[in-house]
Image (cartoon, rainbow, N blue to C red):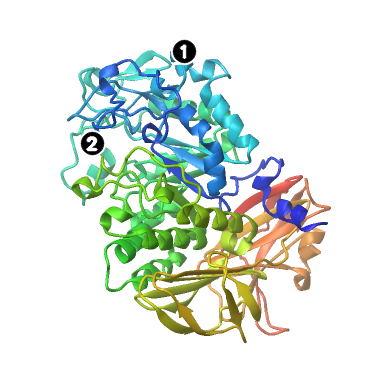
Amino acid sequence: MDKNQQQEDLHPQNTKTKIHLSDVEFRGETMYFIVLDRFHDGTPDNLGEREDLNDPTHQDWGKYWGGDLQGVVDKLDYLQGLGITAIWVTPLFEQVEGLINGLAPLHGYWAKDFKRINERWVNDPSAVRVFERNDTIFDKLISELHRRGMKFILDIVCNHSSPPTDGGKGKLYDDGHLIADFDNDTNNWYHHYGGVTNWEDEWQVLNCELCGLATFNENNIEFRNYIRNAIKMWLDKGVDALRVDTVKHMPLWFWQEFNSDMQSHKPDVFVFGEWIHSSPNIETSVEFANKSGMTILDFGLCNAIRSCLGQGNPEGWQAVHAVFEQDYKYRGANEMVTFFENHDMARLQSLGADESILRIATALIMTARGVPCLYYGSEQCLHNDTNGGDDPYNRPMMESWDTNTEIYKLTSILSAERAKNPAIQLGGQWQKYVTPEVYAFTRRYRDSHCFALFNRGGEAKIDVKDTELPDGKHHCLLSGRDVQITDGNISALELKGKDVLVLSYVGVPVIGQSVARLQVNGIVTKLGEVVGVTGDCPELGEWNLEQAVKLEFINENMWFGEIPFGVSAGKSIAYKLVVLPVEKGGAPVRENRTSRRRSIASEGVQKWRDIWEE
């Protein structure tokens, strides 16, 4: 089997195999978040119901500037060249037509009808009924993305509909038919508790309004059925993943029910939520990430990066490392979505970072644990510093499509490496050097490694111990320089100011007709102990512990491994987790439960998530 075939087997997103039994593997993706109205105008004459809400001169920051889905299709070559594999755009739903304080809903979060698409996003008004036909620009976008091996992420909001405009408040439609009205709420579709006045009061956060937005009553089964059915229809149109808005403002039980329903309908959907300002220090946000059925955007890491690289925090990289050190609190830290700027915060350059610092931030999220997400235009240093660059000035019109910028080239290189190095996708992350100015870590999975180093300061000379890379010369993916590894160490490494170093070593992938990626949480092990998997099939040793499949230690709360299946592919098996002793002849510790049972996919990759039982 040649190397290319091996890589295809390791990374099913590059194959035609459909994943049936679990959420799609997103850890190898590079995401790109687009404010659709501000990206590219592919159809200038789709002006919407009210043309007074448009500003083709791009001077009024509160009005529509013309970006649309045709504009995204037109720029797919650019995005693919950047290394983007998954595109997330702001919500597509039909919006209310109106202004509040001079602002139109160009962002997409004031939904009017979850079963229709905003007229401004499509090429002709009849296409708003996107589920009545299969030839709209949305269908073309999905088809083009999938043809290229790329994915589409639909941004959804379940917490609220619309604020008061001249057309009313909270008028909700089901494919054009009015089904709820905040001001005439006879069927209790909405909460009516007013706005949040105390953000420390959990009840208010869950039940009261944000910025005057009509807040749905999740206790109403009619609402729950409507929103779930609507999102399922989008999944059936080819959507690969969901980004979910304002998840902290609805109870955990709602999301558990919602995600179970989505994943039953489309098992290979990937879902991540916006718990704004989530942090490993906020227990409720950690509980949500662990128990909701979705992962989250990593605001804790985002804020640390912005503090280190944008605001000159004296702690520097130590503040960033402090976030990574708490990864054990999460059941799936390496599936959290990482970023350093978005549509709700000033861009990094508006905080004072220059292009070199922006390059460092990009390289960091492209090599660190998690799924990286770039905000549109950052590869072109797009920013506007009016009023400090805060909303709406963090949403300029995309102006340049230069494929030769430093960050464009860096992203392309590191995205390609992510796609082939399992250490970057799946591995643990081990700090190797940290000061306020310089930070280095190694990602490791099996025999694959990636060493990354970042210098926010001036020229320096350092020694790095135990990189875990094989001895010999290693080629930096970004600068092209050679770095000598001797006894696993780097001696007298000379760093330029604002330098980045990335060294990658790709080992032998796990290959099988079917591969199960097993993640186990909640095991306390001693130094030298290994977690194994034993079972009733040949691939798991038929209960012989000497032939158990050994997992990899990722952090204090996670063991992970890939189990290849051949003769058992397409069959049902039983297995147990076991802690194997340090010394031969020692007593193993098995889970205190009956055997787990799983159906093995006939081909492709599936993900298993288990919690150790004492």
Residue pictured at 63% horizontal, 61% vertical? 421
The tag on residue 126 is 1
Residue at x 58% of width, y 36% of height: 145
Front-most of residues 439 and 430: 439
Distance from label 1 to label 2 (Cα)? 34 Å
Q: Position of residue 396 (x, y in %)?
A: 32, 40
Image quarter of the N terminus: bottom right
Task: State the image coordinates of residue 124 (x, y, percent, origin top left).
Answer: 46, 15
Q: What residue would you read off at disc 2?
A: 209
- Would residue 558 appear left or right of 361 to someone viewing this image? right
Q: Which of marks 1 and 2 is in front?
A: 1
Q: Nearer the viewer, residue 36 or 577?
A: 36
Secondary structure of the residue carrying tag 1 is helix
Residue closest to the eye, 610 or 614: 610
Sequence-wise first label, 1 or 2: 1
Q: Which residue is drawn at 42% across and 33% down?
A: 40
Image coordinates of residue 540 in percent, x first then y, are 76, 62
Under circle 2, the secondary element is loop
